[in-house]
Image: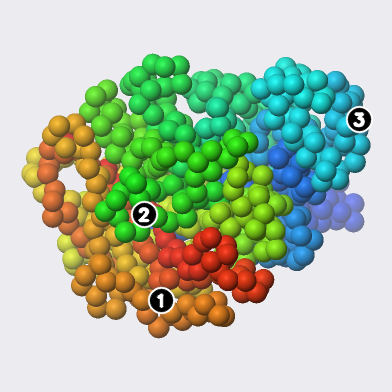
Amino acid sequence: MVKSNLISRVTLIILITFSCKTENKEGLAIKDLADKTKNRTEVVSNPLKNVYWGDTHNHTGNSFDVFLFGTPNSSPEIAYRFAKGEAVESPTTGKPWQLSKPLDFLVIADHAELIGSIPLMYENTPGISDTKTGTAFLRIAPDKSEENMQKIYDILNFAAFDQPNDANLGAKDLINDFGGEKVKEAWTRYIETAEKHNNPGKFTTLIGWEWSSNNSGANLHRVIFMPQDGEIAKQFIPYSALDSDNPEDLWAWLEATSKRTGAEFVAIPHNPNISLGLMFPETRLNGEPVDKAYAEARMKWERSVEITQIKGDSETHPALSPNDEFADFETYDFALTPEGTRPAPTKADYVRSGLKRGLELENEIGMNPYKIGFVGSSDSHTGMSAIEETNFAGKGQHDSEPKKRAHPTGIGSSKGWDMGAAGWVGVWAESNTRQSLVDAFQRKEVYATTGPRMTLRVFGGFNFSESDLNAEMVKTGYEKGVPMGGDLNRTSESVNPGFLISALKDPDGANLDRVQIIKGWLKADGTSDEKVYDIALSDNRTDGSENVGNTVDLKTGKYTNTIGATEFKVFWKDPDFNPEQNAFYYVRVLEIPTPRYSLLDAIELGIDVKDTNHPATIQERIYSSPIWYNSK
C-alpha cells in the first residue's frame, strides 16, 4: 500500500510537471488534472484492522432473470449508487429507496450465463439481435411487457436443456448467439462502471460475476470476484455454467486464467441449503470419491461460503442439530426446480454439517476440503442491497413490496414471505481497498450477519487469560493467537485453547441476547459431533434455557431495548478439550427479538401475521468464521 501511494504521488508530480511545460495555456491542463483527482479519498491503513461492510452478491438487469422477471431498468449504476447510501428510484416499484447507512463495498455478481445479452438484444446490437436466438426472441417478444418477458424466460429454461420450445432453440443456439465473445460488450460496460465508482478508502467496487450451475435443480452457484482492475478483467470473459456446470472445471479455469492474466480470484459457494445434497459432498459429480486433489483445488479457490442470504439461512437445520434450540432460523427449502421440490435436508446442504464432514474427510484423505469462513450477502435481484427488516426490497420484482408477497415468487413454489431479509458480510481489513479486502477474504477474517451491523472480534490461542480482555485485546489477540479464520496447531503441552471475544451491538439496532460458541470435533471412531455453549448471557441470567424475553408490540411493530446487553467481552476456555481431536470453533451472537418484516407487512396490509405463514419476530444473528484446532 505504501509503495502504491508513492507511485501515485510520483505519477501525479510527473503529469503536472509535463503539463506545465507543454500544455499549460491558461492553466487548463493543471485544472483538468485537479478536477479528476479532487474527489479521491485518502486511504488510511490500520494494522489492527477495521471492519468494512459489504455485499458480495448483487444482481442487476445484466442478469437474464432480473431483466425477464420484470426489472429491465435495474443497472450497475443504480446498484453502486444505492450501496453508497444515495437515494435511488427503486427499479421494481419506482419509489424512492435508500439504505439507513451506506455500505463500504459491493460486488455486482450478475449471472455469467448470457450476461448482458438480453439488454443488448433490445438495443438492436448487431451480432446479438440478428442471430437466430435474437431474431426469435424479438419476434415472440417485440416489447418488454411482463407477459413477453415471461415467454422468453420459459423458452430459455427449455432451450438450455434442449427441450421443445416455441422458438425452436437449443442449448447450442444460446451459447453461439448469446454466449462467449458475444457478451464482451456487456462485460466491458460493467467493468467501466465498476471503475468509475471505485473510490479506495471510501467505497470499493470489486469486479465479479456469478457462475450459476444448476445441476438437475441443485444450486451449486459460486460468486467470483478479484482485487485487480478493469485492465486485467478485460483480458477474459467470465466463465459460465454454459461452459461447464461442474465446479472442478470452474477451478481449472480459475487456475489457467490466473496464470495467464495475474488475476487473484475468490470463489464463494452460495446458499448451500438448496444444493440437493451436493454442496459438501463425499462423492464428486463424476462419481469418484472426494480425494486430496479435490480438497486442494477447492481450498485454493473457495475459502468461504455464503451462510445466510435472502433464500434462507444455511448455518444448520433442526433435523441436523436437534439439540440446538436456535437451529430453526429462516429455513428455506424450495429447490430451483419448476415443481418447487422440497427435499429433506442432508448433511451436504448445511454449513455446520459441512464443517463436520470436512473433519471426517480429513481423517480419511489427509486434507480438509471444507475448511471455510463465513460470508453473508443478499442475492438481491433488484440491484439494491436492501435487506433490513424495516427496509426490505425483496429478492426481485415478484416480492418487491408487501402487497405482492402472498403470491409465488417464480422460484419453485415459494412465496414472498418465504424469503429472509439477509445478509451482509463484515470484513476485517487494513483499509477499504480492493487488495486489502480480498486479502481478508483469503485469510477468512470475515463474518456474516443476517442484517444488523454488530461488531465482532474473535481470537483463539493457548496463552490467553481473563486479564487480556482490556483495551489492548486486539493487539494481544494478534500477538498471542489467531483471529477468526485462523488455525491453532497442537503444542508440546496439552493446554486447552482459550478464546477472546468482543461483541458490540449495532449502534442503530437491538441489544444482544447472548454469545455462543459452536464446537465440532472428530471422535476416535472417525465420526464427528457438535455442541453449543452459551458463554455469555444478558440480564444476569445463568441458564441458557431461560429466554431473554420479547418487547415487540405486535400491533405497532415497535420494540424497546429495555432488555439485553449493549456489548459482551468474554474469555472462554474449552472445558471439554481433547488434544487428540481435530476441532473447529465459531461464534454465534444473537440479538433480542425484533419484528420480522412479515409482521411489519401484516400491519401495513391490515392482516393477521399468521396469514404470512411466518413468525412475527426473529432473533437476528452474526456468525464468525471458525478457528480450527489441528491435533497433528
The amino acid type, in three-letter code, at marker 1 is Asn
Amino acid type, callout 3 = Arg
Task: Give SS at disc 2.
Answer: loop
The residue pinned by badge 3 equals 139
Between disc 1 and disc 3, whose residue precedes?
3
Q: Position of residue 423 (x, y in %)?
A: 52, 55
Element type at mark 3: helix
Q: Is residue 97 above or below residue 376?
A: below
Disc 1 vs disc 2: Cβ atoms closer than 8 Å? no
Asked if residue 476 can be seen in this view, the reply is no
Viewer-proximal residue among 75 and 289: 289
Residue 67 coordinates in the image, percent (x, y): 76, 43
Q: Few, some or many C-alpha atoms within 10 Å of disc 2 (few <14, some 14-19, many ≥20)?
A: some
Of 40 and 223, nearer the camera is: 223
Pointer 1 and pointer 3: residues touching (CB < 8 Å)?
no
Q: Residue at x 62, y 71 (%)?
A: 607
Mark 1 or 2, nearer chain start: 2
Q: Residue at x 56, y 69 (%)?
A: 609
Q: Does residue 71 appear anywhere in the picture?
A: yes
| Residue under numbered circle 1 | 550
Asked if residue 139 lies left or right of residue 586, the reply is right
Task: Name which residue type carries label 2.
Answer: Ala
In this picture, residue 262 sits left or right of residue 565: right
Q: Which mark is residue 179?
A: none
Identify residue for label 2. 327
Q: Left of 569 or right of it: where is 53?
A: right
Residue in the picture at 13% in, 48% down: 577
